[in-house]
Image: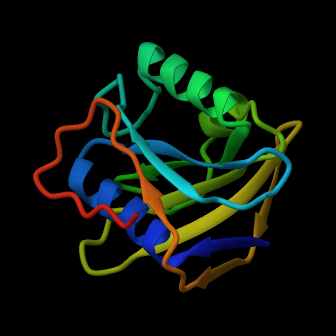
């Protein structure tokens, strides 16, 4: 089960809506071994595509180094689907390289409906998991290489 703070879930959804019609992508870091998503890091989709995402390589290097320095790991890897349901595509499955991560997908195909789902992808096997959204005050959001029109920092 993925347990996620409401502010982080809302930030992921806002990022997905902001980047629409392109796919949005990012990570939520947490203490290594904790399975606690605490630090939201929206990232740049280097592909700028409506059907595919790829982290900007320099940004990814910076983010992963920072997580390493802070003894963190990517608890959640997320992206959006702009025209289909929030379910991993064959490409998503083949590129899933963090077996301990929750893979969150958000569909932005319907402007008034939010589809937010979480999956485990291990050895190309997809397992959907329940999502529990909780309320908390201790949320951090970091923007690397982003130029949003509006950002709410819940620190």
| Residue 49 pos. (x, y %) | 31, 32
Q: Nearer the viewer, residue 94 or 12?
A: 12
Number of marks in the rendered image: 0
Spot occupied by residue 142 in the image (x, y as percentages of width and height): 39, 46
* Residue 65, horizontal then vertical, whole percent: 60, 22
Residue at 35% of width from left, 23% of height from top? 46
Q: Residue at x 35, y 55 (%)?
A: 83
Please provide percent x and percent y for residue 129: 77, 70
Quarter in which the C terminus is drawn: bottom left
Taking the spot 49% from the left edge, 21% from the top edge, the residue there is 62
Residue 20 showing in the rendered view: no
The quarter of the picture where residue 118 lies is bottom right
Q: How is the image coloured?
A: rainbow
Check the image and report above or below for 155 versus 24. below
Q: Nearer the viewer, residue 82 or 122?
A: 122
Q: Quadrant of the N terminus?
A: bottom right
With 30 as the anchor, is 46 left or right in this view? left
Q: Residue furthest top?
A: 58
Residue 84 vs 33, above or below: the answer is below
Residue reaching furthest to the bottom: 135
For residue 109, above or below residue 146: below
Quick check: 21 left or right of 50? left
> Is residue 153 visible in this depiction of the protein?
yes
Q: Residue at x 31, y 61 (%)?
A: 153
Left or right: residue 31 compared with residue 80? right
């Amino acid at each position: 089960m993925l347990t996620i703070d409401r502010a982080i879930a809302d930030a992921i959804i806002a990022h997905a809506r902001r980047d629409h019609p392109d796919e949005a992508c990012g990570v939520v870091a947490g203490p290594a071994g904790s399975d606690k998503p605490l630090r939201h890091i929206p990232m740049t989709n280097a592909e700028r595509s409506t059907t595919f995402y790829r982290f900007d390589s320099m940004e990814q290097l910076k983010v992963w180094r920072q997580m390493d320095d802070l003894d963190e790991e990517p608890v959640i890897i997320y992206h959006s689907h702009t025209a289909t349901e929030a379910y991993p595509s064959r490409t998503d499955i083949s590129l899933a390289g963090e077996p301990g991560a929750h893979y969150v997908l958000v569909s932005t195909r319907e402007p008034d409906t939010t589809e937010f789902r979480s999956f485990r992808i291990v050895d190309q096997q997809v397992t959907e998991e329940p999502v529990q959204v909780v309320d908390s005050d201790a949320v951090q959001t970091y923007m690397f290489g982003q130029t949003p029109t509006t950002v709410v920092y819940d620190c």
